[in-house]
């Protein structure tokens, strides 16, 4: 297999090892606990409590007056 601009040849075993390394890292970094540990999320909720959390959010929004125009600007994800 040829990779990159330098035409480096790697074996099927090396290719699989690289793929496994990337896959393991991807799986770890997409877990909810990974993002929560880095404060990327506010909370991890039990799926059973989803309705409760949504209800609390709607109730909070209903009791919060709109005082200025909402503008997100540019969102980059």
Image (cartoon, rainbow, N blue to C red):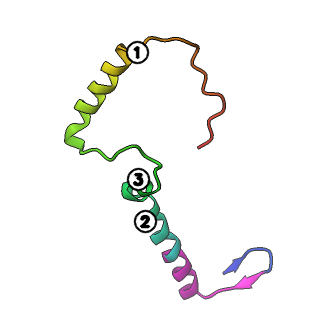
Q: Is residue 68 magenta?
A: no
Instruction: Name the mark on residue 28.
Output: 2
Q: Nearer the viewer, residue 37 or 74?
A: 37
**Residue drawn at (61%, 22%), measured in percent from left and top?**
71
Q: Does label 3 or label 1 sit earlier along the sequence? A: 3
Residue 17 relative to residue 10: left or right: left
**Residue drawn at (21%, 38%), measured in percent from left and top?**
49
Per the model, the C-alpha gap separating discs 2 and 1 is: 38 Å
Residue that badge 1 annotates: 64
Report the magenta stretch's main SS.
helix
Residue that badge 3 annotates: 36
Per the model, the C-alpha gap separating discs 2 and 3 is: 12 Å
Given contact means CB atoms under 8 Å apart, are the residues at marks 2 and 1 in contact? Answer: no
Q: In the image, residue 66 lies at what x, y percent?
A: 48, 12
The single residue placed furthest to the left in the displayed view is: 48
Disc 2 packing (10 Å; few <14; some 14–19; many ≥20): few
Position of 25 relative to 32 (above/below): below
Nearer to us of marks 3 and 1 is: 1
What stretch of residues is rendered in magenta? 7-20
Instruction: Name the mark on residue 9.
Output: none
Q: In the image, residue 34 lies at what x, y percent?
A: 42, 59
Per the model, the C-alpha gap separating discs 3 and 1 is: 27 Å
Nearer to us of marks 2 and 1 is: 1
Q: Provide the secondary structure element on which disc 2 rests.
A: helix
């Amino acid at each position: 297999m040829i990779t990159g601009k330098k035409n480096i040849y790697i074996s099927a075993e090396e290719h699989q090892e690289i793929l496994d390394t990337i896959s393991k890292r991807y799986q770890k970094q997409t877990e909810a606990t990974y993002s929560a540990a880095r404060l990327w999320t506010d909370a991890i909720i039990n799926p059973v409590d989803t309705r409760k959390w949504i209800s609390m959010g709607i109730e909070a929004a209903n009791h919060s007056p709109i005082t200025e125009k909402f503008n997100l600007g540019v969102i980059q994800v």
